[in-house]
Image: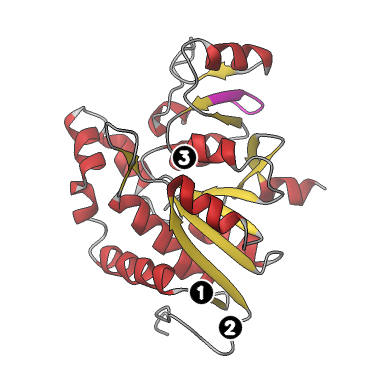
Amino acid sequence: MSRRSPQPSSATARCVVELEWGTPGLAALGERTAAIVIVDVLSFSTSVDIAVSRGATVLPCPRWQEGDAKRYAEHENALLAGENDRGYSLRPASLIAVRPGERVVMPSPNGSDLSWQAADRSATFTACLRNVKAVAEYIAASWPTVGIVAAGERWPDGSTRFALEDWIGAGALAEALHALDFRCTAEAHAAAVAFRAFERERFVRLHRTASATELHERGDGRDVELAFDLNASTCAPRLVDRAYMDACTATQTT
């Protein structure tokens, strides 16, 4: 049986998924959607998935002034990504060996900063290509309206730079939600169509985005491979009390 292609509208769809970018998009979607999903494929969302799926807890935080993140980690009895003796950082590959029960603070100007801004919401998630099916299935059971926030990167002046991998990741989630009877807005539909095109070629061209190219040239190609491993994870990271934990595991144990 062939998989359905997402449609921009449907009279029978019971739920709605929208898509916007960055901080302004988060503010707009926060006013009209029940659940928010932050997508930062390279690499915050992927790092969160890998750590949380292994039983760790991830605490996002913005890029405060020097020393603030370290003090926050000490206050939370957590390891600071990039500054710990275990070698944990924002790199997904560095978190493969993370131990269950460990707490890791992850500062970044994109996905982590957006998570911090959305922390007071009752339903905030992060998704990447590794876990879109799991996140979609978990959300679809309880929330009728979903706002996908593509994180993007930053230009030198601090403004949001379009990041193709986040657009494709957001499209993968939109497509997964559409398969669960969500109606896609035009923006979510366009991203879902783009995702299907890149999926058909096994994300070959996605390796040539600016962010992926930078990682490959730096010798961090393993991080890219992990990020583009579609639905390799069954984890649904949900932000609770300013910390990401696996919502699926929490549901099973309650």
| Amino acid type at image mark 2 | Ala
Residue at the disc numbered 3: 111
Evaluate if marks 1 and 2 touch, with contact meaning CB atoms under 8 Å apart: yes
Q: Quote the CA–CA distance across marks 1 and 2.
A: 9 Å
Q: Which residue is mark 2?
A: 13
The three-letter code of the residue at mark 1 reads: His
Is residue 99 located in the magenta-colored stretch of the structure? yes
Q: Which residues are magenta?
A: 97-105
The secondary structure type at the circle numbered 1 is: helix
- Main SS of residues in magenta: loop
Is residue 182 shown to the viewer in this render? Answer: yes
Q: Residues within 10 Å of mark 2 (few under 14, many from 20)?
A: few
Q: Is 30 on the left or on the right of 178, as rendered?
A: right
Amino acid under label 3? Gly
Labelled pair 3, 2 in contact (Cβ < 8 Å):
no
Image check: 225 left or right of 214?
right
Lower sequence index among marks 1 and 2: 2
